[in-house]
Image (tube, rainbow, N blue to C red):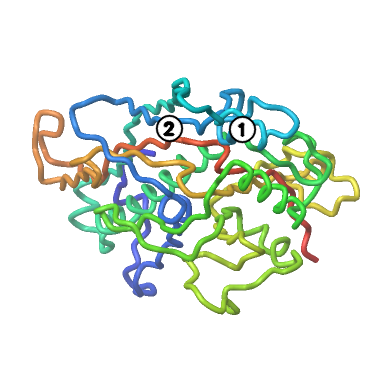
């Protein structure tokens, strides 16, 4: 957008001289609360991270469901077939089995943001632009990190669709208890475990305990639909346990966390018709992704020693060949990040519409 110059921002001298209005700081939900595993890579090793898990006995590599379920080879009474497969006789040594690995490869990316300002702006303007820029850099980093995670998790293959929809383009219903229960059925069949800890927000990547549950992340526009679900319990009525930031309540074993910064897919669903669902254009339904996470479904990768932001602040007084008079200053940062969706069977993504609130 170019260099911040003195004449581009009107002065407040002689006007209301209160503090600059605080920005609406984006509240992280996925990056701070939704990450179940944090991986750290040693520096100077590679830009590629490979995580590995081993399928349980008898599982098949066909898809995310068969990879998580025991003894998929049998038919009919598979439980009895598994018992028979393990029977042996006196003096008979069982044949050895082998394990099958599933690898997930992730490439670490570098990200950055930068603000610039002139020496005149720095020397004469009453507003502390470098300080405000520094504040906004932090907000941008948190938002970019949130969108990185959001984009990867939306790629989960374990997908559900609102109403009678079978694709995003045919979504024609809001979130319902029935849809949530179908997700529960799939997660439990895949031996997914409820989340019991989350990564804390400190730089040491420590974890903190949370009351067990499957965590659901979605846009704030879906709050009325969620509150209308049978059995919804708001956080103020929790008998025990502490809600996490942005959590609005729970239904059965699902805990709902909302954010206005998990954007919808505008005009991506079915025709609005008489559905009563919101549409940006008034013709096609806006589709809202719902991210449902169990324990260890995905991870974030950081580079050890470079996990903190590598920030830059160069005041205009810095003179060099590219700026011999020291007329330009900069404030910015760079960082590394990658997200690995490690087990599609231990999370779900739902696509739904949102009812119009009259």
Residue closest to the eye, 162 or 331: 162
Cβ–Cβ under 8 Å for marks 2 and 1: no
Give the residue furthest to the right.
274
- CA–CA distance between discs 2 and 1? 22 Å
- How crowded is the residue under tag 2: few (<14 C-alpha within 10 Å), some, or many (20+)? few
Left/right placement of residue 131 relative to residue 196 reads left
For the C terminus, the quadrant is bottom right
146 lies above or below 103 = below
Q: Position of residue 341 (x, y in %)?
A: 48, 36
Could you tell me which residue is drawn at 80 percent across and 36 percent down? 170
Left/right placement of residue 91 relative to residue 174 reads left
Left/right placement of residue 149 relative to residue 51 reads right
Label 1 sits on a secondary structure element that is helix
Residue closest to the eye, 315 or 283: 283
Residue at mark 2: 53
Left/right placement of residue 68 relative to residue 43 reads right
- How crowded is the residue under tag 1: few (<14 C-alpha within 10 Å), some, or many (20+)? some
- Of the residues under marks 2 and 1, which one precedes in the sequence? 2
Residue at mark 1: 82
Give the residue furthest to the front.
90
* Image-quadrant location for residue 99: top left
């Amino acid at each position: 957008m170019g260099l911040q110059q003195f004449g581009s921002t009107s002065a407040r001298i002689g006007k209301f001289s209160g503090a600059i209005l605080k920005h609406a700081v984006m509240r992280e939900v996925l990056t701070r609360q939704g990450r179940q595993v944090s991986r750290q890579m040693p520096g100077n090793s590679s830009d590629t991270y490979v995580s590995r898990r081993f399928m349980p006995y008898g599982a098949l590599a066909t898809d995310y469901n068969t990879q998580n379920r025991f003894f998929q080879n049998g038919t009919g009474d598979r439980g009895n077939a598994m018992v028979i497969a393990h029977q042996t006789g006196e003096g008979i040594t069982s044949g050895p089995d082998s394990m099958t690995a599933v690898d997930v490869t992730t490439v670490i990316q570098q990200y950055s943001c930068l603000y610039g300002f002139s020496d005149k702006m720095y020397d004469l303007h009453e507003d502390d632009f470098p300080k405000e820029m520094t504040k906004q850099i932090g907000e941008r980093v948190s938002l970019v990190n949130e969108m990185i995670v959001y984009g990867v998790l939306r790629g989960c293959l374990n997908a559900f669709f609102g109403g009678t929809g079978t694709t995003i383009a045919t979504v024609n219903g809001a979130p319902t208890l029935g849809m949530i229960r179908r997700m529960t059925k799939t997660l439990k069949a895949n031996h997914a475990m409820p989340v019991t800890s989350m990564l804390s927000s400190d730089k040491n990547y420590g974890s903190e305990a949370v009351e067990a549950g499957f965590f659901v992340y979605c846009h704030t526009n879906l709050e009325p639909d969620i509150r209308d679900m049978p059995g919804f319990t708001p956080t103020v009525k929790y008998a025990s346990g502490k809600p996490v930031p942005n959590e609005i309540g729970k239904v059965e074993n699902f805990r709902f966390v909302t954010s206005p910064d998990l954007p919808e897919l505008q005009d991506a669903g079915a025709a609005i018709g008489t559905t009563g669902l919101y549409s940006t254009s008034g013709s096609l339904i806006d589709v809202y992704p719902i991210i449902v996470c169990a324990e260890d479904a995905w991870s974030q990768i950081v580079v050890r020693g470079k996990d903190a932001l590598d920030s830059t602040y160069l005041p205009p007084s810095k003179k060099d060949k590219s700026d011999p008079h020291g007329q330009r200053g900069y404030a910015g940062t760079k960082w590394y990040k990658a997200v690995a969706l490690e087990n599609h069977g231990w999370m779900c993504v739902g696509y739904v519409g949102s009812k119009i609130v009259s």
